[in-house]
Structures are given as structure tokens and as C-alpha cells.
Image (spheres, helix red, strand yellow):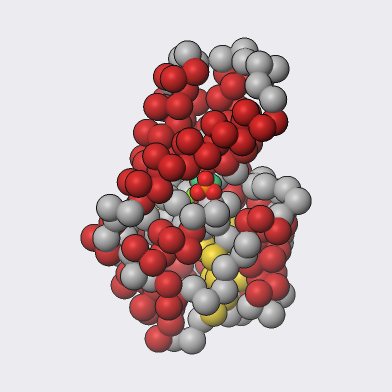
Amino acid sequence: DIKGFVFDLDGVITDTSILHGTAWHQLADSLGVAWSEELGNGLKGISRMDSLEMILKAGGKENDYTEAEKEKLAAQKNTNYVAEVDKMTPANILPGMKAFLDDLRAKGYQLSLASASKNAPRVLGKLELADYFPKIVDPASLTHGKPDPEIYTKGAELLNLPANQCIGVEDAAAGVQAINAAGEVSLGIGDSTELGAADMVFADTAEVTLANIEKKLG
Ligand code: B16
Ligand code: MG
């Protein structure tokens, strides 16, 4: 029996991936690294420093900067990103997600957040959803990012639930892999080919309802 839900944030509850993408694109331009949509998509669910490494590698610049310089570049990206986050409002919650969270809460399901983003509490605050997520995995506590299961394992632990009683909700392939490796039921939102490893896939957040999940669980 499912008793809890472990949520990703970006791409599931709100679409900050566009804001992340814009901020990384700006940084890539300033470093002379050619930007591509593929590069941008590959950064979804990936931690800040790992994202920077991927961008530098894409430009053949992975050996051009010291650790301290890399920290500065990442901080620069984050400053630009946070300025955009601060313009967010509850209108930025993805379609159907507020109703889904309300339904889960009303029916007594437990909720936790498994976002790789250190800005997650700030984003939830802007969306006025902080009350729904008293339990947030601290990404700074992780030794491995997605697709490693660690973040989803911790998300279930915060709820005191065994993994198989939790559904993990993700938009990124790396995140679905993490949920599966943690032994949770994986719910993917997005392209069914890209998220083919998920136990169930919904094309759009608006389709994610308890009734539709029950149908897919059979
Ligand atoms: P920050 P998620 C991830 O969030 C984003 O998808 C990814 O693009 C971002 O780099 C990462 O958070 C770290 O974010 O720089 O704010 O710490 O999808 O795991 O909710
Ligand atoms: Mg995501």
C-alpha cells in the first residue's frame, strides 16, 4: 500500500528548469562555450557544481579553472537564477499540482521533497507551498546526486516509510533512475520514451491525479 510521496521540485511542481537554463546559457556565453538545447536538457536534476562541470566539458574547458574559480562561476549563475526565482508567484505552480497536493494531504498521504536544488525552500516559499513540505532532503547532505538513489532513500526515511510504500515523482530520466534504484514506485512526468524506465508515465502534470495513479497501478 502506498502511504507517501517523494517529490522532485523542478519540472514537477514548477518549471524552474527554464530559469536554470537561461542562467546557465548566460554563463556559457560569457565563457565562450557553445550552448545547445541538448546541453540544457542534460542539466535537469543535476547538481549545481556537476552542471558547471558538464558545461565546461562541453566547451573543452574542464581544465581551465581552479576550484575557487569554479565556485565563483557557480555563484554567479546562482545570483542570476535567484533574481528570477524571486519574481515567482503561486501562478507558477504547474497545472493540476496544487489540487493534487491538496488531495494527497486531505487523504493523509505523507509528503517529502527530494530536490537537488539548494534553492528549493526559497522556491516553495514563493509558490506558497512551504507548509506542504515540512520534510525536505537537504541536498548539501548528499554524497551522490541523481541518478544515485541516495536522495530518494532519504526522502522515504524522512517519512519513516519503507521504500516500497512510496511513490517518487520525477520529470528527469536521472531522477527516475534514482527512484527505481531506491526501490520506490516511479512516476515520470514527460516524454514516455525519455522516461521509459518509470513504472508509470504521465505526459503532463495536469494528468497526475490519485484516480489516474490507481488506474495505472492496477
Ligand atoms: P540549485 P530538481 C535541480 O532540481 C534542477 O533540475 C537542476 O537543473 C539544478 O541544477 C539543481 O536542482 C540544483 O539547483 O543550483 O538551485 O542548487 O529537479 O532536483 O528539483
Ligand atoms: Mg526535476
150 shown above or below 28:
below
Which one is in front, 173 or 91? 91
Q: Identify the residue at horizontal 70%, vertical 63% (top origin).
A: 153
Q: Position of residue 116 (x, y in %)?
A: 58, 52
Q: Position of residue 62 (x, y in %)?
A: 66, 19
Residue 193 in sight in this render: no
Between 191 and 92, the one nearer to me in the picture: 92
Image quarter in which the N terminus is found = bottom right
Q: Residue shown at 36%/51% (left/top)? A: 85
Compare residues 181 and 140 and report the one nearer the observer.
Answer: 140
Count of marks overlaid on the render: 0
Query: Is residue 65 left or right of 212 when viewed as pictured?
Result: right
Q: Residue at x 42, y 19 (%)?
A: 29
Give the answer, above or below, for where 218 lies relative to 115: below
Q: Which residue occupies 34% across, 70% down?
A: 128
In the rendered image, which quarter is residue 154 located in? bottom right
Query: Residue 147 location in percent, x, y?
Result: 66, 45
Q: Quadrant of residue 94?
A: bottom left
Q: Is residue 118 left or right of residue 208?
A: right
Q: Is residue 37 visible?
A: yes
Residue at the left extreme of this rendering: 91
